[in-house]
Amino acid sequence: MKATKMIRRRGTRSGFTLVELLVVIAIIGVMVGLLLPAVQAAREAARRMSCSNNMKQIGLGMHNYHDSLRSFPLGSYNLRETWPASGSNWRALLLPYIEQSPLYDQLQFTATSSFMAGGAAGANALLGNEVLRELLIPTYRCPSSAIPEFEVAPGSNNQERTLNISYVGIQGAARPLPGPDPNRGTADLGHGWSCDNGLLFPNEVARMRDATDGLSNTIIVADQSGLVAGRNRTSNYYGGWMGTRHPRPVSAGGAALDLWQTGTTCVRFAPNSQIVQTGATEAMYRNNTVINSFHPGGINVANADGSVEFISNSIDFLVLKMMCCKYDGQPFSRE
């Protein structure tokens, strides 16, 4: 009889008590909390590597372009004086060299075609280049960016929703420059500092031999896939494909007034700067748009030798200027 009662008592105890269940749930919650940052870090590391691979492909495309045409592409350009603009920028010119020849062959590069999306472009918007509407090119998008691919950003004229491209060409560095001439290759043409002391600048081309500081010491393309003061202020005002306001180069000085453009920047502020400065960074068509990203701690850049490196937000700004300028002649250390 006693044995039977003992068996019954043991049989009535099954499963977890509420307290035990809560303890198990709490342990699982702690473990998830500990693992989640590691998972997120691993995902971001993969995205950053993918961004680096994009920039590596762009850097190699620059070399192939140079091998074929004996120069780097125009940073941005226009084919006529009259409005609206008809030119594009290095992003379109590089397409055949990043495995996008079929797309390039569909585009028109004439004085009557247009790469401008919507807005003031009116009836000439994307004339002859309609294929660019809502066209995604993965090589031109940083996977870490939270900016929508075809966003019509506040203050933009991208009504036809062309690609917000995540990478910007480097015109060079804004004055004061390191070296004996603090003003070399810079000009105030009405939209912040414009410059041609780098390798991708408006309405003229540079060659490898112009980088007298060395190709490995000169940045040609940088990340521009982040936000400034909570807004998309990247160089994608009429979308990512437009060129310059007019066909005159920075070297023309005062004759090139009103030179605003898409696709390049003259570096004036530190990586991921949140400075909104009227005439420099507040509008997407200005010449000093900030190089930035959603990568924690800094940005990826492509050097003119085809290498890619990560630049910290805390980099000495004078060193960054030296890296953007092709001929300042000043030694620097990346450490």
Image: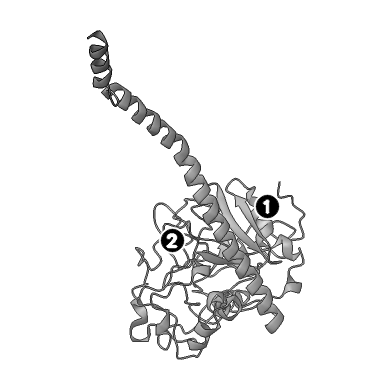
Farthest front residue? 1
Residue 233 is tagged as 2
**What separation in Å lies between label 1 and label 2 (alpha carbons)?**
24 Å
Residue 323 in view (yes/no): yes
Tell which circle, 1 or 2, labels the residue nearer the N-terminal end.
Answer: 2
Kind of residue at disc 2? Arg
Relative to 175, 280 lies left or right: left
| Dot 1 alpha-carbon crowd within 10 angstroms: few under 14, some 14 to 19, many 20 or more | some
- In front: 2, or 273? 2
Relative to 231, 190 lies left or right: right
Residue at 50% across / 90% down in the picture? 110
Q: Position of residue 126 (x, y in %)?
A: 40, 83
Asked if residue 329 is positioned above or below residue 8 in the image, the reply reads: below
Kind of residue at disc 1? Val
Location of the N terminus by quadrant is: top left
Residue at the spot of label 1:
319
